[in-house]
Amino acid sequence: MQTSINRKDLIITQKLEIIVLLALVMVYSCGDFRLDDWERLEEMQVDILALVGEANCSDSTQCRYIALGSKPCGGPWEFLVYCSSEVDSVRLVELVNEYNQFEEELNNKYGRISDCSVPPEPQLGFIGGHCVDLREPYHYQAYDTLETLIVSGWFKIEFQDSTAIQGSWVFDSVGEPENIGPQTGNGHFIGYQNTAEIRLELNPYMMDNNVSLYGTFNGTVINGEWQFTGYPGLLNEGSFYAEK
């Protein structure tokens, strides 16, 4: 009798082990398949971004944008700015359509959710030989001559024509830096730009107490030097880095 019970228990145990093993195999397989899906989506995005590049352009009339991604609630995740004369537009549209369709399939397949906000369409600008979205702020960091971070914040270009630009800034000091001039708080700047260089006057109507940024523009990055000037001349200086 005892032997019969043991055999019965053994059979039940073996069945349970098989069920657990099958469940683990299914989970592992689904996990791998899910991972493969997202890896493929990521690879597709990398190809698209590589094709768009840094949106180098020779003419503002060639600046374009395209909607990328499929949110589960509808609409794109973002817009990509590009130059139509430097990018194979037909190929770009083809890749983006494939990407958007595949992401929509994954949304349905895995029951993904998202908010229903819609990203604003870009406000196209042309700065330093690049097509840009003027709506996106630049994240700003300033350093002293010893490369110590002294200021951080953001600025936003709100108007731009062939050479002149205007915008707003909000900066905060990091630590207790000295003699950095009026580059904390907030304000409005005016500036000038050409093919590769950009200059911003953070306090354009304070000639005796002004901070100027002199930088080069490379796609989404502006970096260069800041200078604090007054009637005596140059009072302090350092470097800055700004990126969208």
Image (cartoon, rainbow, N blue to C red):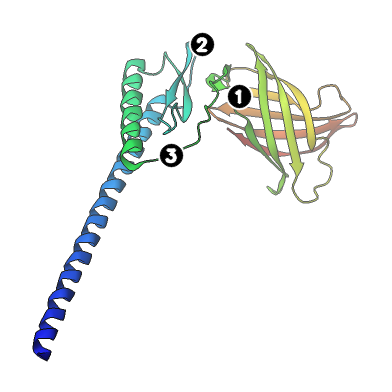
Image location of residue 49, percent across then percent down: 41, 30
Image location of residue 99, percent across then percent down: 34, 29
Crowding near the residue tagged with mark 2, few <14, some 14–19, many ≥20 C-alpha atoms within 10 Å? some
Q: CA distance from mark 2 to mark 3?
A: 40 Å
Q: Which mark is residue 59?
A: 2
Depicted 223 relative to depicted 129: above or below = below
User: Which residue is denoted by mark 3 in the rendering?
Assistant: 113
Label pair 1/2, CB-CB below 8 angstroms: no
Identify the secondary structure beneath mark 1. Answer: loop
N-terminal label among 1 and 2:
2
Label count reads 3
Q: Horizontal placement of 209 versus 59: left or right?
A: right
Quarter of the image with the C terminus is top right
Kind of residue at disc 1: Arg
Image location of residue 189, percent across then percent down: 75, 24
Q: CA distance from mark 1 to mark 2?
A: 20 Å
Residue at position x 58%, y 27% from top?
217
Nearer to us of marks 1 and 2 is 1
Kind of residue at disc 2: Asp
Q: Horizontal placement of 229 versus 59: left or right?
A: right
Of the pair 113 and 221, the residue shown nearer to us: 113
Label pair 2/3, CB-CB below 8 angstroms: no
N-terminal label among 3 and 1:
3
Identify the secondary structure beneath mark 3. Answer: loop
Depicted 181 relative to depicted 66: above or below = below
Quarter of the image with the N terminus is bottom left
Q: Which mark is residue 135?
A: 1
